[in-house]
Image (cartoon, grey):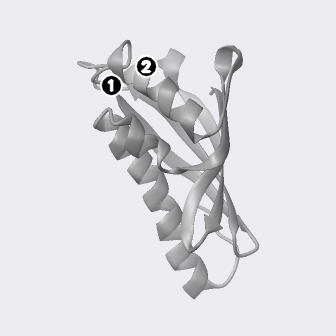
Amino acid sequence: MTNTGTAPTRTSDNQAVGDVLGGIVAAWAANDADAFAGFYTDDATVVLPGGVFHVGRNEIRAYMAAGFAGPMKGSRSVDEQENVRFIGDKAAIVVSRSGFQLPGENRVPADRVRRATWVLSKRDDRWLVEAYHNCPA
């Protein structure tokens, strides 16, 4: 993981950014669309393979709720941060290797391995996802 900036501030911000991604993984494991969407800003964007494009926390929540009630029920997300870069005091870009496992799988199949880019901002001392995009790794 790579950081830029002063150590004391970046250490706590780095932890907070990691906590956001960890919270998203935990919400996915619980199949909790409300908790999942709670880590995104009201106007966040999500771009996924296949032309999927969502704007706003409510669309993200609805998309995940449908997935958790259907084909993604019981699945879990895997996300490993590869790079974190801070831009000023209130923005961060995270690149991660990610994917998801369906029930009974012990690893992410190659066709579901993704590289993801997360853009986060600090609002009222809380880091939230502004934009997310992934593509096949």
Q: Nearer the viewer, residue 32 or 120?
A: 32
Query: Could you tell me which secondary element the residue under label 1 belongs to?
Result: loop
Which residue is drawn at the image coordinates 53% and 68% (left, top)?
Answer: 126
The image shows residue 69 at horizontal and vertical percentages of 34, 18
Residue drawn at (47%, 51%) of the image: 21
- In the rendered image, the vertical position of residue 37 relative to residue 126, given as above or below: above
Q: Residue furthest left?
A: 104
Q: Residue at x 43, y 42 (%)?
A: 36
Left or right: residue 118 versus residue 76 is: right
Which of these two is toward me, 12 or 90? 90
Q: Quadrant of the C terminus?
A: top right
Q: Nearer the viewer, mark 2 or mark 1?
A: 2
Taking the image as drawn, is residue 118 in sight?
Answer: no
- Give the residue drawn at x 28%, y 25%: 106
Residue 134: tell me if it is visible: yes
Instruction: Give the image quarter of residue 122.
Output: bottom right
Q: Which mark is residue 55?
A: none
Q: Amino acid at mark 2?
A: Ala
Residue 85 at x, y = what percent? 69, 62
Residue bearing the label numbered 2 = 66
Q: Are marks 2 and 1 in contact (CB under 8 Å)?
A: no
Crowdedness near tag 2: few (<14), some (14–19) or many (≥20) residues, C-alpha within 10 Å: few
Give the spatial CA distance, label 2 vs label 1: 13 Å
- Give coordinates of residue 6: x percent, y percent: 66, 85
Q: Residue 81 in the image: x percent, y percent?
A: 53, 50
In the picture provided, is 26 more to the left or to the right than 44?
A: left
Which residue in the protein does label 1 denote? 75
Against 10, is 2 above or below?
A: above
